[in-house]
């Protein structure tokens, strides 16, 4: 079978790479069929092993990446069908082009694998095993480096890191408190890729040891995580009860002029606490209402009626900056309103979504952005913690700002919790909102901070500093929940102090050492 795969050329090999990439997606949320990684990556490495030129290697890697990203990012197409008449025709071309671009990362990873040349035909079995193992390790390093680069290159989109395959098992993600999402991705890809040394096994015992070592390490990580969780009791912040409001308003209806007042009143009605419950703060989602509340005194006074005594209501809005009667800028913002209808805090989103909130190279692009209006949003200044009466300081995150590992905090004051307002109604009942939640859980563990997530259509949730979900409102459900606010972890995790730096240094050193040692070993065997 392996010999047959190695003889495949052209379309047959490209199709196999596409299928392998799609198999890798099935390991991601919400499916979590993690064992498929042990098929997808060894299959890719087997296909790469028979490539004779860099061009062939890049093509195979690109096909794998396209199959992986087009299945992993398919939920993005739903956003184009919110206004199908204007944007529906762009859905498939736009998502296809996006995935074709991201597939270049996988093509470059495939090229990196060529830095470890294949073993000679007359090489000893141990030498062949060494080469296969070296290629698998270099592949894992290069894949993880690509994850890091796509987290910041061209503003970044680090969606679906391989570490998120473990998000359904809190014990497995505890290690991100030490090595972050990037480190767990590296270990995951390494464990799956090293199975390629068994295909075919030149010397089974040696190959089995090399393939099993990272799996044992993952088991140890899971066991250590379980031990950490067994002693992890999280107290609640005293005298704080949050009411999370999820109105479940479809994106197609959200901005209709005849429904805007009704949507505002829905939010207000859902903000009334259950009998006998003392709520201290109410939280609405991203762009919860279609009014510029910071400049609309009458509606702000209406909203203030839902503010608990001595507390505040936190909501996402579109904030308008005006001068001399003209609109200077639009911001995707978070406002906090007290019981006197005063705006007591403002945060403007700093990391905007290309094509959704603004158009890069606007003069060259012939269609408007996906969000309402023709004017681009402007980015806010640097993120900083917000302190409100009766609440510990929190770090604001709007929409996909929560997916950037190591970049969710800002300012001099470390917050005691993270607040993520989002509007996943753009993506309907798809994998997108579920994958978004999984990445929020990773941020909580990395930073040792509880994360409160409020989404217009779901999934709204309270996540403790160990990544466990304390309460949630499911996707597509209208309602509200009254929840306690967990306290942060007793100590700041290593990752919260050092970020991705240590893992990146280890990866760089390991890659250089691996290439040098393999070249030395090859020279000795020649």
Image (spheres, helix red, strand yellow):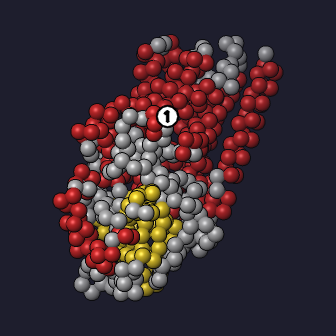
- Residue 42's x, y, as percent? 52, 30
Which residue is farthest left? 258
So how many labels did they put on this image?
Answer: 1
- Which residue is identified by label 1? 102
Q: Quadrant of residue 459?
A: bottom left
Q: Give the side of residue 257 with respect to residue 421, left or right.
A: left
In this view of the protein, which residue sits in the foreground, 347 or 525?
347
Q: Do we see residue 36 in this rendering? A: no
Image quarter where the C terminus lies is: top right
Going by the picture, which residue comes out furthest to the front?
324
User: In the displayed structure, would residue 22 be above or below residue 270?
Assistant: above
Q: Position of residue 129 (x, y in %)?
A: 65, 26
Q: Quadrant of residue 289?
A: bottom left
Image vertical order of residue 180 relative to residue 293, above or below: above
Residue at image location 23% in from the left, 74% down from the top:
269
Observer-nearest of 251 and 50: 251
Residue 516 coordinates in the image, percent (x, y): 78, 30
Image point (66%, 63%), residue name: 497
What residue do we see at 68% from left, 46% from top? Answer: 504
Q: Residues within 10 Å of mark 1 (few under 14, many from 20)?
A: many
Residue 247: in sight, yes or no? yes
x then y, percent, for residue 392: 51, 78
The correct choice, above or below, for 82 with respect to 195 in the image is below
> SS at mark 1?
helix
Q: Observer-nearest residue: 205 or 38?
A: 38
Q: Residue at x 20, y 66 (%)?
A: 262
Q: Quadrant of residue 190?
A: top right
Q: Is residue 389 left or right of residue 308?
A: right
């Amino acid at each position: 079978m392996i010999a047959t795969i190695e003889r495949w050329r052209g379309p047959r090999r490209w199709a196999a790479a596409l299928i392998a990439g799609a198999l890798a997606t099935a390991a991601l949320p919400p499916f979590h069929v993690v064992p498929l990684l042990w098929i997808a990556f060894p299959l890719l490495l087997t296909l790469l092993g028979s490539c004779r030129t860099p061009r062939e290697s890049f093509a195979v890697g690109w096909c794998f990446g396209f199959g992986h990203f087009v299945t992993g990012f398919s939920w993005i197409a739903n956003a184009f069908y919110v206004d199908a008449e204007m944007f529906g025709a762009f859905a498939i071309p736009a998502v296809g082009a996006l995935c074709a671009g991201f597939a270049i990362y996988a093509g470059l990873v495939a090229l990196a694998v060529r830095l470890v040349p294949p073993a000679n035909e007359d090489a000893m079995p141990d030498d062949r095993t060494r080469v296969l193992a070296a290629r698998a390790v270099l592949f894992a390093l290069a894949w993880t480096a690509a994850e890091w680069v796509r987290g910041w290159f061209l503003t970044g989109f680090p969606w679906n890191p391989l570490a998120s395959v473990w998000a359904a098992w809190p014990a497995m993600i505890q290690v991100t408190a030490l090595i972050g999402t990037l480190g767990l991705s590296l270990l995951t890809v390494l464990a799956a890729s090293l199975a390629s040394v068994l295909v075919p096994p030149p010397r089974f015992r040696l190959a089995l040891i090399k393939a099993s070592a990272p799996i044992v390490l993952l088991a140890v990580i899971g066991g250590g995580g379980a031990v950490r969780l067994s002693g992890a009791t999280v107290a609640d912040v005293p005298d704080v009860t949050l009411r999370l409001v999820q109105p479940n308003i479809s994106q197609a209806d959200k901005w209709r002029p005849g429904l805007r007042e009704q949507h505002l009143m829905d939010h207000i009605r859902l903000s009334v606490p259950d009998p006998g419950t003392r709520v201290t703060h109410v939280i609405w989602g991203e762009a919860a209402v279609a009014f510029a509340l910071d400049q609309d005194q009458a509606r702000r006074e209406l909203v203030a009626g839902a503010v608990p005594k001595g507390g505040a209501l936190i909501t996402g809005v579109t904030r308008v900056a005006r001068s001399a009667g003209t609109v200077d800028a639009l911001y995707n913002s978070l406002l906090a309103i007290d019981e006197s209808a005063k705006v007591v805090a403002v945060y403007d989103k700093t990391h905007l979504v290309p094509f959704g909130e603004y158009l890069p190279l606007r003069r060259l692009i012939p269609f408007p952005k996906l969000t309402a209006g023709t004017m681009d949003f402007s980015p806010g200044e640097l993120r900083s913690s917000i302190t409100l009466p009766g609440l510990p300081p929190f770090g604001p995150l709007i929409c996909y700002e929560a997916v950037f590992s190591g970049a969710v905090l800002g300012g001099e004051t470390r917050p005691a919790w993270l607040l993520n307002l989002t509007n996943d109604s753009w993506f309907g009942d798809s994998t997108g909102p579920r994958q978004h939640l999984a990445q929020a859980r990773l941020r909580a563990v990395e930073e040792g901070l509880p994360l409160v997530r409020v989404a217009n259509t779901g999934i709204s949730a309270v996540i403790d500093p160990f990544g466990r979900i304390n309460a949630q409102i499911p996707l597509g459900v209208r309602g509200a929940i009254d929840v306690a606010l967990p306290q942060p972890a007793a100590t700041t995790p290593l990752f919260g102090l050092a970020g991705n730096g240590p893992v990146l240094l280890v990866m760089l050193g390991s890659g250089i050492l691996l290439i040098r040692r393999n070249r030395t070993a090859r020279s000795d065997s020649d």
